[in-house]
Amino acid sequence: MKPEIVIAICAVIVSVVSLVTSIYFSWCMRDHNKRSVRPLPYVEASDFENELSVRLWNNGPGPLILKKVIALHEKEKLSGHLIDLVPSPPDNLFFNNFSKVSSGIAVLPGNSLNLLDFGVDENDAKAVRYRDQLRDFLGNLVVQVEYTDIYELPFPIYMKDLTWFHRHRS
């Protein structure tokens, strides 16, 4: 064989190996990019003497795009927005904040969304009774979060029970 033909065959082999390597590493980079913006939902139940709250946090590096956030009360067979399920507060008592989540809301990385926030004046007997009623009710709920990321990849439904609110029971 002539040296020119050997050099040409080697050049074709190197080109094919380079093409395969380039395609493989492009696939790896695309997979890495998808994983690097994956959201991580977490439902936090805060129960203090002067405040009750339920917050949805995004602990991942990418935006948490909400499809649906519902609360389920298995004993009473109720489901819906958390604020719609809780008992109504007595006159002159109000929630500090709450959210009815609609599809498409995004929670940025490191941020949270208040699903329910109730401040309690510990000197007000009516507020303390309602706080205890809320604790009892919230402890029976499960929060379900349906979400996606910026690539609209499917994720399993995140579920968190709120039994933390029952720890005060005797």
Image (cartoon, helix red, strand yellow):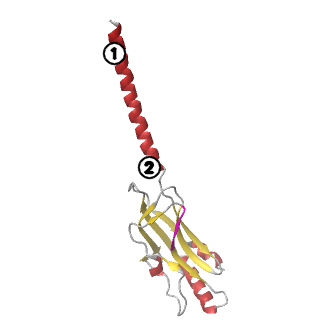
Image quarter (top left, top right, bottom left or bottom right) of the N terminus: top left
Image-based side of 144 in relation to 166, left or right: left
**Residue ID at (45%, 47%):** 33
- Quarter of the rendering containing residue 23: top left
Secondary element type, mark 1: helix
Marks 2/1: CA–CA distance: 39 Å
For the residue pair 47 and 20, the one nearer the viewer reads as 20
Q: Main secondary structure of the magenta part?
A: strand
Q: Amino acid at mark 2?
A: Lys
Crowd class of label 1 (few under 14; some 14 to 19; many from 20; radius 10 Å): few
Secondary element type, mark 2: helix
Place of residue 151 in the rendered image (x, y in percent of width and height, measured from the top left): 39, 54
Q: Which residue is mark 1?
A: 8
Residue numbers of the magenta segment: 110-114
Image-based side of 23 in relation to 86, left or right: left
Cβ atoms at labels 2 and 1 below 8 Å apart: no
Is 112 in the magenta?
yes
Crowd class of label 2 (few under 14; some 14 to 19; many from 20; radius 10 Å): some
Mark yes or no: residue 161 visible: no
Mark 2 vs 1, N-terminal side: 1
Q: Amino acid at mark 1?
A: Ala
Place of residue 42 in the rendered image (x, y in percent of width and height, measured from the top left): 53, 64
